[in-house]
């Protein structure tokens, strides 16, 4: 090929330049709790938490993509993913936010009266004994051979402090939207030492979207209409968090 032909081809290629794809407005990593060997809590009907969290994550992904987000799931199927790996995926994606999806289970087990929604962000100390018990249950997926204290080192540098302030703002935005959108009992925004949140270098929250141990709520959480309401509410909460952040930045 002569230089003239190469030039002609290059020019031909520039006559109708392809517009570069617009970058995503924001990047979300969704973390469906448990998976593979780890069932999580069991519902009153014997349905594992891992199956319901994945269904909700898939619904939520669609809704966030409509907002212009790029959405990555820490697991898209029923596979085992270690807790530190989940936050590492969010860090590698340089995500703007990390949302870990879980379902609660009362200490009394199936048939217990506890119901409603709790939203968490990270702290070395739990808000109360109940928050501490939730973290202990969710941290149980961690291999026993792992001696590291993933949460002990947090709150040490300024970046962590900024991430925690954003996590608190995100937690309140999502929690408010969830309580309004699902009319579930409001059990509050709390803090606890969750290992899955400890390594995340961005706004990160863990949602306890209802009690699979409750006789009515436990069954309801497996219904598509309920999952749709939950996913829609989380998406609305994330949209509200983003709007407030953009307003702050332009002030
Ligand atoms: Zn869980």
Image (spheres, rainbow, N blue to C red):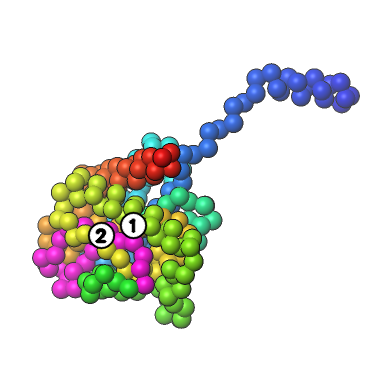
Q: Secondary structure at mark 2?
A: strand
Location of residue 12 in the rendering, given as x and y in whole percent from the top left corner: 73, 19
Disc 1: which residue: 168
Q: Secondary structure at mark 1?
A: helix
In the image, residue 69 lies at what x, y percent?
A: 43, 41
Up the image or down, 223 lies above or below 46; here it is: above
| 199 lies left or right of 207 | right
Measured Cα–Cα span from mark 2 to mark 1: 9 Å
First-in-chain label (2 vs 1)? 1
Residue drawn where x is 71% and y is 23% of the image: 13
The furthest residue to the right? 2
Q: Which mark is residue 157?
A: none
Horizontal and vertical percent position of residue 93: 52, 52
Q: Residue at x 32, y 42 (%)?
A: 240
Q: Which residues are magenta?
A: 103-124
Closer to the camera in the image, 250 or 232: 250
Q: Is residue 57 left or right of residue 20?
A: left
Q: Which residue is mark 2?
A: 189
Q: Are marks 2 and 1 in contact (CB under 8 Å)?
A: yes
| Mark 1 Cα-neighbour bin, 10 Å: few <14, some 14–19, many ≥20 | many
Q: Picture coordinates of residue 201 (x, y %)?
A: 48, 59
């Amino acid at each position: 090929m002569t230089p003239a032909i190469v030039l002609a081809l290059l020019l031909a290629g520039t006559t109708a330049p392809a517009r570069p794809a617009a970058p995503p407005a924001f990047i979300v990593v969704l973390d469906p709790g448990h998976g593979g060997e780890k069932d999580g809590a069991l519902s009153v009907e014997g349905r594992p938490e891992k199956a319901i969290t994945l269904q909700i994550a898939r619904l939520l992904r669609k809704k966030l993509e409509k907002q212009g987000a790029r959405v990555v799931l820490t697991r898209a199927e029923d596979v085992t993913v270690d807790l530190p790996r989940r936050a590492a995926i969010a860090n590698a994606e340089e995500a703007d936010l990390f949302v870990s999806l879980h379902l609660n289970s009362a200490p009394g087990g199936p048939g217990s009266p506890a119901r409603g929604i709790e939203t968490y962000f990270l702290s070395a100390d739990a808000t109360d004994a109940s928050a501490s018990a939730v973290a202990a249950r969710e941290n149980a997926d961690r291999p026993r051979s792992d001696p590291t204290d993933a949460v002990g080192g947090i709150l040490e540098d300024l970046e962590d402090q900024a991430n925690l302030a954003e996590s608190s703002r995100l937690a309140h935005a999502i929690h408010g939207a969830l309580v309004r959108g699902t009319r579930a009992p409001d059990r509050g925004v709390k803090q606890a030492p969750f290992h899955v949140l400890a390594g995340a270098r961005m706004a990160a929250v863990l949602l306890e979207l209802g009690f699979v141990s409750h006789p009515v709520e436990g069954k309801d959480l497996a219904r598509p209409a309920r999952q749709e309401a939950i996913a829609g509410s989380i998406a609305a909460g994330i949209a509200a968090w983003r709007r407030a952040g953009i307003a702050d930045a332009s002030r």
